[in-house]
Image (cartoon, rainbow, N blue to C red):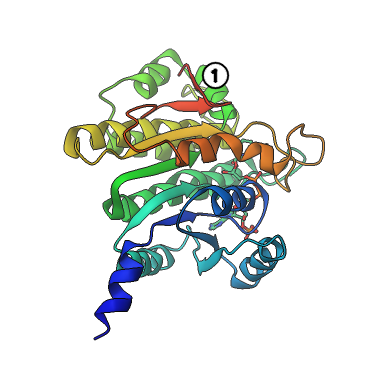
């Protein structure tokens, strides 16, 4: 009915950052508002917290937009995906930043910590990728905020598990099976005997980094001409509600590597399918 409005929104570029009402996610939105020529969305599972975050950046002279998005709720993911498809014709930058971690002092049984942590950090982030990857525009950039703790957890796995996580032929289904197996084995306290380290957060991020590598290989094979680059990264140890106030980096400093990957210039061919920290590809 209003083709003019539709066309103008469709040609506007758009960046989406999950879990961006605070912490590193909010700092990523702040940096993208300054450096990316397009609309930048704070997404928040709670709209009130999202509105507070919009106020913070607006007071700094920036103009973020806001959309509700709870990555643990598949209907919230599909609603958001439909919104970005209908309004922008897809997505140019997706940063999967939302994540959780139990505090060291938390006495919640390890099996519950494993289930809850993997649900958000691995399975829900995978749901985001399942529904948003088909929306990625040509030249798009996907950044999965993982962690060095995932690399450490990988090294703490049995030789057999390490070999699978590092192999070039691991499939998404096999990875999902391994993540489910870890959660299952924690219920009978058999995870260590089964070759897993004692860290639910670490295993969730081992899974996320491995998933990033699988999806990047799939992109190269199935959409070689789309020039979409997908990477996992570690922001460093950052002062946020998750990591506490003793961490050395500010949230803006933690945003540097994710934003570098989100803004890899047109025509760049790498990094792709890598784990990146301090803007450098790290061994896996
Ligand atoms: N801080 C560090 O030192 C560090 C180091 C390595 C990696 N990381 C990773 O960096 C990312 C950001 O961490 P942070 O330190 O900024 O943590 P944070 O301050 O605790 O922020 C986490 C963000 O994720 C959101 N979130 C959690 N579950 C969600 C869900 N189901 N749907 C949507 N949003 C959800 C939170 O929303 P609510 O406000 O609603 O809870 C919050 O906005 C995480 O993936 C973390 O694992 C952090």
The residue carrying pointer 1 sits among few (fewer than 14), some (14 to 19) or many (20 or more) residues within 10 Å by Cα, namely some
Say if 64 sits above or below 168 in the image: below
Task: Tell me if residue 192 can be seen.
Answer: no
Q: What residue would you read off at disc 1?
A: 156
Residue 196 in the image: x percent, y percent?
A: 51, 25
Q: Quadrant of residue 46?
A: bottom right
Residue 258 in the image: x percent, y percent?
A: 53, 38
Residue 18 in the image: x percent, y percent?
A: 51, 54
Say if 3 sits above or below 262 in the image: below
Q: Is residue 256 left or right of residue 233?
A: right
Q: Quadrant of residue 177?
A: top left
Q: Residue at x 41, y 40 (%)?
A: 180
Q: Is residue 273 left or right of residue 190?
A: left
**The N terminus: image quadrant:** bottom left
Q: Residue at x 30, y 74 (%)?
A: 6
Q: Residue at x 44, y 52 (%)?
A: 124
Q: Is residue 96 left or right of residue 102?
A: left
Say if 113 sits above or below 195 in the image: below
Out of 194 and 269, give the one closest to the viewer: 269
Q: Is mark 1 within 8 Å of ligand 1?
A: no
Residue that lies at the very extreme toward the top in this rendered image? 159
Q: Secondary structure at mark 1?
A: loop
Residue that lies at the very extreme toward the bottom in this rendered image? 1
**The C terminus: image quadrant:** top left
Q: Is residue 245 left or right of residue 283?
A: right
Task: Tell me if residue 52 can be seen.
Answer: yes
Q: Residue at x 72, y 65 (%)?
A: 59
Residue 260 in the image: x percent, y percent?
A: 51, 36
Question: How many marks are shown on the rendered structure?
Answer: 1
């Amino acid at each position: 009915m209003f083709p003019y409005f539709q066309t103008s929104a469709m040609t506007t570029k758009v960046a989406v950052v999950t879990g961006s009402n605070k912490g590193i996610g909010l700092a990523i939105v702040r940096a993208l508002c300054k450096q990316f020529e397009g609309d930048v969305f704070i997404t928040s599972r709670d709209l009130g917290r999202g509105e507070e975050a919009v106020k913070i950046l607006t007071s700094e002279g920036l103009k973020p937009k806001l959309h509700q998005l709870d990555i643990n709720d598949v209907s919230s993911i599909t609603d958001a995906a439909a919104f970005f498809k209908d309004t922008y014709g897809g997505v140019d930058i997706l940063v999967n930043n939302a994540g959780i971690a139990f505090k060291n002092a938390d006495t919640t049984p390890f099996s519950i910590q494993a289930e809850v942590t993997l649900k958000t950090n691995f399975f829900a982030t995978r749901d985001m990728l399942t529904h948003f990857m088909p929306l990625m525009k040509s030249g798009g950039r996907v950044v999965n905020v993982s962690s060095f703790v995932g690399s450490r957890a990988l090294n703490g796995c049995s030789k057999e598990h390490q070999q699978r996580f590092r192999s070039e032929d691991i499939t998404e289904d096999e990875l999902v099976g391994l993540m489910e197996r870890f959660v299952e084995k924690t219920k009978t306290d058999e995870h260590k005997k089964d070759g897993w380290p004692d860290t639910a957060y670490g295993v969730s991020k081992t899974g996320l980094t491995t998933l990033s590598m699988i999806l990047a290989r799939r992109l190269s094979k199935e959409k070689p001409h789309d020039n979409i680059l997908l990477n996992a990264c570690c922001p460093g140890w950052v002062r946020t509600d998750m990591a506490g106030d003793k961490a050395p980096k500010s949230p803006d400093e933690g945003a540097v590597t994710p934003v570098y990957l989100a803004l890899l210039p047109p025509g760049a061919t790498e990094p792709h399918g890598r784990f990146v920290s301090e803007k450098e590809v790290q061994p896996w």
